[in-house]
């Protein structure tokens, strides 16, 4: 799904050249899918299984594009409190860059409530939603946000 988004946003990079024939077929097959549909279609699929050769998505043009789209490398920080829920076992979005981003936000005075539930990328979307909704309801009710910046692991 991410590759399809980047294909649309960066047509000049010709990202399909970095994918194997099987990878290109899978990306085309999911072009109109929602993430749930794609996950059901290709459960447990890893990016490495789509590449034309090992680490082909780390080549400079792709690496620059990924860096430009990573919150870890964006200079600005939010002005509102953050509720960040992210599984340490997430197979699609590694936890270490997310933790580093939250630490950077904390260093700039942003209040961060961090929750790391068990599960994978898609399961945490569902299991983390109630906490996110409580966080929003509390903000609208004027309740102070929880700040657990000090507990973010490296």
Image (cartoon, helix red, strand yellow):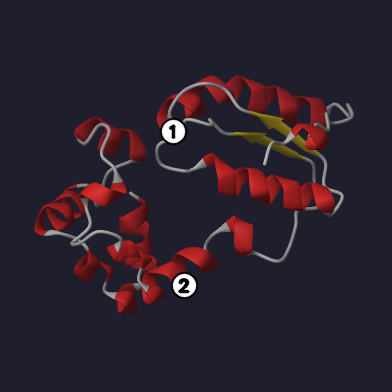
Q: Residue 154: horizontal and vertical position, in percent?
A: 67, 42
Q: Which residue is drawn at 49% across and 29% down?
A: 125
**Residue 100, percent from left and from top:** 66, 49
The vertical placement of 144 against 100, above or below, is above
Q: Residue at x 37, y 65 (%)?
A: 58
Q: Which residue is drawn at 29% across and 34% down?
A: 39
**Figure quadrant of residue 11:** bottom left
Residue 130 location (% of width, % of height): 61, 20
Q: Name the residue furthest bottom.
A: 12
Drawn side of residue 61 relative to residue 26, left or right:
right
Mark 2 crowdedness (10 Å alpha carbons): few <14, some 14-19, many ≥20? few
- In this rendering, position of residue 6 left or right of residue 15: right
Residue 69 image point, x, y percent: 52, 63
Q: What element carries label 1?
A: helix
Q: Quadrant of residue 42?
A: top left
Residue at the spot 60% in from the left edge and 45% down from the top edge? 98
C-alpha separation, residue under disc 1 versus residue under disc 2:
24 Å
SS for callout 2: helix
Tag shown at residue 121: 1
Q: Badge 2 is on which residue?
A: 64
The residue nearer to you, when weighing 146 against 151, is: 151
Q: Is residue 43 above or below residue 82?
A: above
């Amino acid at each position: 799904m991410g590759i399809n988004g980047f294909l649309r946003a960066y047509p000049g990079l010709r990202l399909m050249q970095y994918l194997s024939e099987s990878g290109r077929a899978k990306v085309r097959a999911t072009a109109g899918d929602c993430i749930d549909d794609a996950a059901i279609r290709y459960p447990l699929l890893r990016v490495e299984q789509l590449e034309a050769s090992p680490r082909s998505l780390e080549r400079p043009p792709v690496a620059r594009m990924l860096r430009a789209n990573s919150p870890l490398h964006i200079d600005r920080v939010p002005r509102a409190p953050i509720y960040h829920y992210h599984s340490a076992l997430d197979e699609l979005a590694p936890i270490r860059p997310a933790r580093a981003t939250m630490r950077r936000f904390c260093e700039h005075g942003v209040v961060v409530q961090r929750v790391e539930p068990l599960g994978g990328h898609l399961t945490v979307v569902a299991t983390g939603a109630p906490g996110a909704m409580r966080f929003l309801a509390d903000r609208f009710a004027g309740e102070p946000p929880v700040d657990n910046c000090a507990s973010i692991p490296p």
